[in-house]
Image (tube, helix red, strand yellow):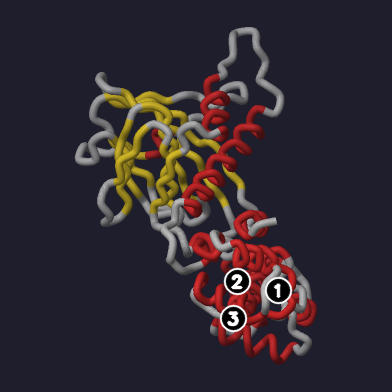
Amino acid sequence: MDALSEVLRLASLTGSVLTDATAGGAWCVSVPAATSRCFAHVVLEGDCFLKAGDAQPLALRAGDVAFVARGDGHLIGSDLSVEAAPFAALLRPPVAGELAPVTLGGSGRRTRWVTLAICVDRHLAQPLFAALPPVLKAGLRGTAPLAWLADSLGLSLSGSDAPRPGGTAALSRVAELVLIEALRRHVEDLPPGGSGWLAGLNDRYVGAALALVHGRPGEHWTVERLARQVGLSRSALAERFSLAVGEPIFGFLTNVRLQLAAHELATTAHSIETIAEGAGYEAVNSFSRAFKRAYGKPPSVWRRKSRRRR
């Protein structure tokens, strides 16, 4: 069990492959902003640029993944100054269950890239997504997930072949593995001495404590009990956690519990009393006060307004 896996599990990460595109010459594609999903682009051959917002263009080459974690609109292309084609023009319905390749642009140096659609519950993924840069770039050259993706897309049907059983489901799982590998690379490449949730993952003891908090948030954790679980003294874990994550361990645990409680209020019919108990509160009044401090509304009001939005 590790904290990254627990957050992705709780947030119900799913992935799919939207496009398998090859472009030549001067080309550019405009990908609109999205609230229900975010996009990752995997360059399989050639090179291109990606620009999101006012940031400088990011150079991508074969084997690179660019994950636009916050769903911002962005451009991808060989020349970002040319007129951009809408991303919707690249979408094709599957043919016999297989993804239909797309071509655009003119002659000249060619680039092949794949666009992944990533869906998560953004509220539950907040610890991770808030810690990521607007565009995460990771090199996956030589990794198994990238090879699986290329191999899966390289398969084509002959006139007499039937669709491969489970092909679409397998491609979705590969898309998820590609993103997870990119996230892992990003965490491992973080410079030492930083602070925040991602930095905590690189500390053996803090990472173990984060995994316990995210994996079993309803347990009656104390700093002493967490310290025993990870093999440190109470004072040593408290100090390491505050330095690595940037906030006290008990405050972090409280935020995680309230985050899960907010999700339950919005998505289940569980009583507020039951949700309060699951969040580690023995008294509903104490839970309501803590929830209002964190979210600006009492649990009952949050539930009502969240359901209206959904």
Q: Amino acid at mark 3?
A: Gly
> Residues under labels 2 and 3: Cα distance?
24 Å
Residue 270 point in image, percent of width and height? 78, 73
Q: Which mark is residue 226?
A: 1
The label nearer to you, 2 versus 1, is 1
**Label 3: which secondary element:** helix
Is 97 situated left or right of 42 in this image?
Answer: right
Residue, disc 3:
251
* Residue 304 visible from this viewpoint: no
Above/below status of 13 relative to 48: below
Mark 1 burial class by Cα count in 10 Å: few <14, some 14-19, many 20+: many
**Label 1: which secondary element:** helix
Question: Residue furthest toward the top?
Answer: 160
Residue 259 point in image, percent of width and height? 62, 72
**Mark 1 or mark 3: whose residue is earlier in sequence:** 1
Above/below status of 234 relative to 44: below
